[in-house]
Image (cartoon, rainbow, N blue to C red):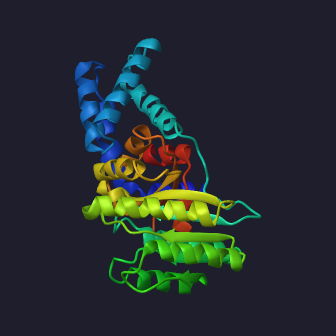
Amino acid sequence: MAFLQNLQSKISRTREQFTGKLSGIFSGSKLNDDLYEELEEALIQGDVGFGTACYLVAHLSKRVKDERITDPALLQPVLEEEITAILLKNGQIPLALKEGQLNIWMMVGVNGAGKTTTIGKLAAKYTLEGKKVIVAAADTFRAAAAEQLAIWANRAGADLIRQTEGADPGAVVFDACRAAAARHADLLIIDTAGRLQNKANLMDELRKIEKIIEREAPDAAVEKLLVLDAGTGQNAISQTKIFGETVNLSGIILTKLDGTAKGGVVIGIVNESSLPIRMIGVGESIDDLRNFDPQEFASALFK
């Protein structure tokens, strides 16, 4: 309950943008085509995306007919149920270590999405739990990327594997996999580049890293996680498609939900992809990076 209240507070900007207009629509006196058009427009403005907005309105309209709903005030709980169903569509899969084996989490996403901060929080979380954590700085092209990661690794008490700026990212991952095995690590977190302006080169690089992990750590429990900035709205959906075409992603970590009014994109991301959202970031502290609970999020969005 405490975290739900905290989540309600942290996503207040999204809730104001998303449900503020809906409340006005649902307080109308007539349930007709005009109401559905207003609802669709409000959902689109709430960053759920055009396709998802149409999907929700169609499902809502069908339930109105099937359940013989005549009062617009009764639509909000129905919409909440439909949104929760979307959020549950791809499953609820908490991000957790598999005990007794090496876990490798490969983090992908564009620069600025929050990969480095997310890696630092995850490293801190598991070192506090007594796990052996290694961080690999495989973004060797962005200036100061390794230095930023080194600061986070030092704070967390995690080992850092890095090479000089401009080095082959695959070589860093090779060294990191060998080090993880030799040091009996519980978790290896791999940072990667996110230079979409060089899309072809970036995707080739990510494929190479995948192959090195498969070759050097065939028995590891591997997660390939896309880090998205919720504040980018519909761009986050585009990034999901771009990275999903190259990397066999296992889920999404959505960051910066506390600082944006565009959190409705959570619904669009799940509806337009086959990927579950595994974690959300709603603040700066370690505890503000949490496993995603679809029902909890939907409740916080509407209340």
Observer-nearest of 138 and 228: 138
Position of residue 53 measured from the top left corner of the image (x, y, whole percent)? 32, 33
> Is 248 situated left or right of 176 in this image?
left
> Is 123 situated left or right of 15 in this image?
right
Query: For residue 302, what is the image quadrant?
Result: top left
Residue 36 can be seen, yes or no: yes
Residue depicted at 70% across the width and 73% down the height: 129
Residue depicted at 31% across the width and 66% down the height: 195
Residue depicted at 63% across the width and 76% down the height: 178
Observer-nearest of 62 and 184: 184
Q: Quarter of the image for the N terminus: give it.
A: bottom right
Observer-nearest of 21 and 257: 257
Residue depicted at 36% across the width and 23% down the height: 58
Residue 72's place in the image compared with 134, above or below, is: above
> Is 130 situated left or right of 228 in this image?
right
Position of residue 273 measured from the top left corner of the image (x, y, whole percent)? 43, 41
Query: For residue 221, what is the image quadrant?
Result: bottom right
Position of residue 278 measured from the top left corner of the image (x, y, whole percent)? 54, 53
| Name of the residue lying farthest toward the front | 215
Report the label total.
0
Residue 10 can be seen, yes or no: no
Observer-nearest of 208 and 132: 208
| Name of the residue lying farthest toward the right | 100
